[in-house]
Image (cartoon, rainbow, N blue to C red):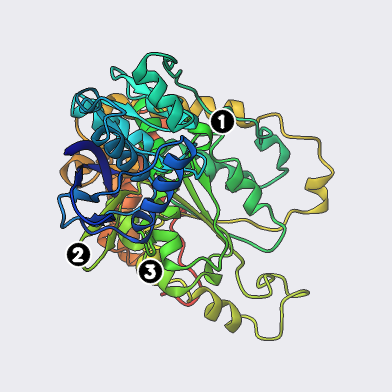
């Protein structure tokens, strides 16, 4: 007898439907899994065997063959346990195969028959909705699957609970979608004294989703400024929240199956490798650049990162996608991020202070900052110096303006951009390009003349020219101006300063 159960395999955040075929035939007792399974899937037979034994069920003394089609797609992960067990139970007549045909199934089995959480339930639920099927998933992730909407979700805590549901003796309730609560302490710009120019750059970065680089000595407040950027940005829209949650679901980091509503803020250590930043590894998981999608990726001590890891960020910064190349496939993850980087001007950190600088200054600063390549440096819209905070600034009372006031201005600027780009593709000024950018960010005559002269003097690349236009457009939005004026171009140019050693 042969039974068939639908499940999924992941390609990036996309779900590919897999047909799990279970055949129980006459022959010597055996339990074989075919269809290009990895090590975790191959071990499913032992977990399934133990789970059935815990229910008082023994495998029939026959030849059991499990085929997962299409057979040329690699099957990875432990979520194939439950589909295989359901297929066996259907073939043994314990579960109704015709009713199971209307569901996609995924979950990991414990030796006692419990069903454990797995990665990727949210994209699986969306795939099930597309295929007009229901979903059977672990109880801990029922709320996550419920966000797909319009599908029947069964979230049993154990294999026994699933059997009882189909027998009618213990009907499972419908899971309720949940939203993750933000229990972190609020971070306010009022905590930072001084640094008015850096705060202005932070506001511009938040308003247009621009990349930002802060250069300053240790203790000047660079990390504090970066940590307060998400509080200035508008909350995630429902579509953005779904995108972010799908990526975290595939990576197994969606806590409690709750949908994320706060913009991600990822700050990996400078020892991070290329796979941890961009994605990859043995099973091609999303990297930090994808986990920060629609949020902020903060790289502190930028020159201390591996050169290869920094260079690998160039393509995601430009395209908004992280592509992980494999011999048999290319996996793509969304990576539309806002890069915020911080660095010291030199290794000792006191390049501009004659009393504290080391004896190698200024050569040490040139060598230290040259660790950042020109192409990566060119992809950062805003470059701002963050000087050391003076004792006079520290003795002042907290600033009158905090994150709430700045966030209100940012929200107004973002609303203008949302209306401007409605139906055109970009969501903010940092994403505008080509003819669209030339149309919406064309400066007035005085502004264009200033930009042309400055581009010649500063030797701006074509990318640098366009990034100045994007920042100028954001500055005009913050001022509530329809056109980009000379003043906006001048301020945008002030954020593109050449680093030592670059001329």
Choose top left, top right, bottom left or bottom right for residue 502. Answer: bottom left
Seen from this angle, which residue lies furthest bottom?
Answer: 360
State how far apart marks 1 and 3 are (Cα): 33 Å
Which disc is residue 33 wearing? none
The answer to whether residue 294 is visible is no
Name the residue carrying label 1: 406
Q: Earlier in the sequence, mark 1 or mark 3?
A: 3
For the residues carrying marks 1 and 3, which lies nearer the camera in this image? 3
Asked if labels 3 and 1 touch by Cβ distance under 8 angstroms, the answer is no
Q: Position of residue 16 (x, y in %)?
A: 21, 43
Q: Is label 2 or label 1 in front?
A: 2
Split into 4 quadrants, where in the image is the N terminus? top left
Horizontal and vertical percent for residue 41?
34, 54
Q: Secondary structure at mark 2?
A: loop
Label 1: how many Cα within 10 Å (few below 14, some 14–19, many 20+): many
Q: In this figure, which residue is indicated by the disc labeled 3?
A: 311
User: Which residue is the site of mark 2?
Assistant: 328
Left or right placement of residue 107 versus residue 227 in this view: left
Q: CA distance from mark 3 to mark 2?
A: 24 Å
Q: Earlier in the sequence, mark 2 or mark 1?
A: 2
Q: Label 2 neighbourhood size at 10 Å, few (<14), some (14-19), many (20+)?
A: few
Residue drawn at 28 percent across, 41 percent down: 443
* SS assignment at label 1: helix
Give the Cα distance between marks 2 and 1.
48 Å
Give the mark toward the camera: 3 or 2: 2
Residue 344 in the image: state x and y as whole percent: 62, 66
First in sequence: mark 3 vs mark 2: 3
Using residue 260 as the reference point, say whether residue 448 is left or right of it.
Answer: left
From the viewer's side, name the closer residue of 193 and 422: 422
Instruction: Give the vertical position of 21 relative to 351 (above or below).
Output: above
The spot of residue 445 in percent (x, y) is 25, 43
Of 6 and 183, nearer the camera is: 6
């Amino acid at each position: 007898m042969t039974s068939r159960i639908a499940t999924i395999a992941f390609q990036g955040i996309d779900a590919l439907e897999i047909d799990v075929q279970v055949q129980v035939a006459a022959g010597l007792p055996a339990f074989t899994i075919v269809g290009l399974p990895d090590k975790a899937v191959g071990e499913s037979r032992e977990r399934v065997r133990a789970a059935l034994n815990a229910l008082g069920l023994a495998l029939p003394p026959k030849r059991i063959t499990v085929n997962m089609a299409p057979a040329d797609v690699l099957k990875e992960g432990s979520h194939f346990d439950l589909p295989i067990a359901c297929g066996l139970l259907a073939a043994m007549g314990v579960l109704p195969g015709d009713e199971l045909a209307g569901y996609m199934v995924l979950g990991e089995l414990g030796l006692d028959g419990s069903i454990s959480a797995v990665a990727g339930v949210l994209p699986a639920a969306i795939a099930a909705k597309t295929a007009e099927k229901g979903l059977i998933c672990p109880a801990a992730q029922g709320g996550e699957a419920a966000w797909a909407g319009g599908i029947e979700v069964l979230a049993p805590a154990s294999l026994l609970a699933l059997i009882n549901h189909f027998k009618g003796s213990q009907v499972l309730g419908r899971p309720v979608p949940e939203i993750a609560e933000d229990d972190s302490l609020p971070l306010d710009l009022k905590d930072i004294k001084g640094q008015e120019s850096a705060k202005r750059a932070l506001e511009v970065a938040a308003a247009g989703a621009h990349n930002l680089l802060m250069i300053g000595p240790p203790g000047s407040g660079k990390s504090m400024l970066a940590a307060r950027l998400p509080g200035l940005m508008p909350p995630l829209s429902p579509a953005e929240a779904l995108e972010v949650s799908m990526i975290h679901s595939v990576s197994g980091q969606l806590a409690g199956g709750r949908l994320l509503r706060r913009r991600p803020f990822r700050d990996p250590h400078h020892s991070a490798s290329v796979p941890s930043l961009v994605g990859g590894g043995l099973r091609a998981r999303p990297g930090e650049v994808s986990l920060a999608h629609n949020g902020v990726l903060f790289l502190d001590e930028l020159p201390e990162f591996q050169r290869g890891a920094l260079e690998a960020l160039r393509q995601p910064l430009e395209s908004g996608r992280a592509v992980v190349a494999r011999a048999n496939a290319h996996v793509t993850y969304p990576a539309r991020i806002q890069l915020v980087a911080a660095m010291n001007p030199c290794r000792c950190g006191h390049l501009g202070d004659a009393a504290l600088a080391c004896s190698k200054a200024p050569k040490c600063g040139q060598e230290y900052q040259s660790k950042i390549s020109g192409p990566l440096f060119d992809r950062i819209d805003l470059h701002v110096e963050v000087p050391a905070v003076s004792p006079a600034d520290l003795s002042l009372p907290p600033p009158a303006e905090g994150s709430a006031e700045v966030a209100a201005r940012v929200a107004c600027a973002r609303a203008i951009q949302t209306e401007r780009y409605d139906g055109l593709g970009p969501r903010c000024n940092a994403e505008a390009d080509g003819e669209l950018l030339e149309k919406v960010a064309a400066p007035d005559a005085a502004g264009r003349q200033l930009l042309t002269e400055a581009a010649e003097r500063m030797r701006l690349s074509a990318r640098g020219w366009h990034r100045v236009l994007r920042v100028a457009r954001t500055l005009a939005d913050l001022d509530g101006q329809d056109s980009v004026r000379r003043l906006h171009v001048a301020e945008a140019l002030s954020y593109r300063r050449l680093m030592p050693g670059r001329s």
